Amino acid sequence: MIQMNNVNYRFCKRCLTRDMMDKDEYFKTLRALIEDVKGDERASDSLYEERLRVCLSCEKLFDGLCAACGCYVELRAVIKDNSCPYEKW
Ligand code: SF4
């Protein structure tokens, strides 16, 4: 579960594909969640880009997901206090 702006968002890693919403819609929701992280909770642009640069060179990155933790790395990285489960950032 991810908490942003006092709202809890749950991402299910174990849903069946038949229960998932349209993938375009899903990614729009994901992008909106990333944009919705604001203020003290949000990593600076430079920190965010540095984290994503590390993820892009990591063997655990697959389809935008981290194979180590199951998170979408862009959402994980935008939250200032988050860290990489492999301590790469
Ligand atoms: S969060 Fe860490 S382990 Fe996961 S893809 Fe990024 S660098 Fe790799």
Image: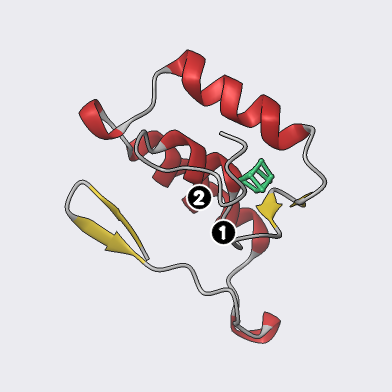
What count of labels does the image hold?
2
**Which residue does the image show at 39% across and 68% down from the upper left?**
10
Which quarter of the rendered picture does the C terminus lie within? Answer: top right
Amino acid type, mark 2: Leu
Task: Say the numbered circle drawn on residue 30.
Answer: 2
Which quadrant of the view contains residue 18? bottom right
Task: Say if mark 2 contacts mark 1, CB within 8 Å.
Answer: yes
**Within-10-Å neighbours for mark 2: few <14, some 14–19, many 20+:** some
Name the colouring of the figure: secondary structure
Q: Residue furthest front?
A: 87
Label 2 to label 1: alpha-carbon separation? 6 Å
Task: Say the numbered circle drawn on residue 76.
Answer: none
Of the pair 37 and 18, the residue shown nearer to us:
37
Secondary structure beneath label 1: helix
Q: Residue furthest left?
A: 6
Kindly identify which residue carries mark 1: 26
Q: Position of residue 7 (x, y in %)?
A: 22, 57
66, above or below 52, in the image: below
**Within-10-Å neighbours for mark 1: few <14, some 14–19, many 20+:** few
Residue 11 left/right relative to 14:
left
37, above or below 12, in the image: above
Q: Position of residue 58 (x, y in %)?
A: 77, 40
Q: Quadrant of ligand 1?
A: top right
Secondary structure beneath label 2: helix
Cβ of mark 1 under 8 Å from ligand 1: the answer is: no
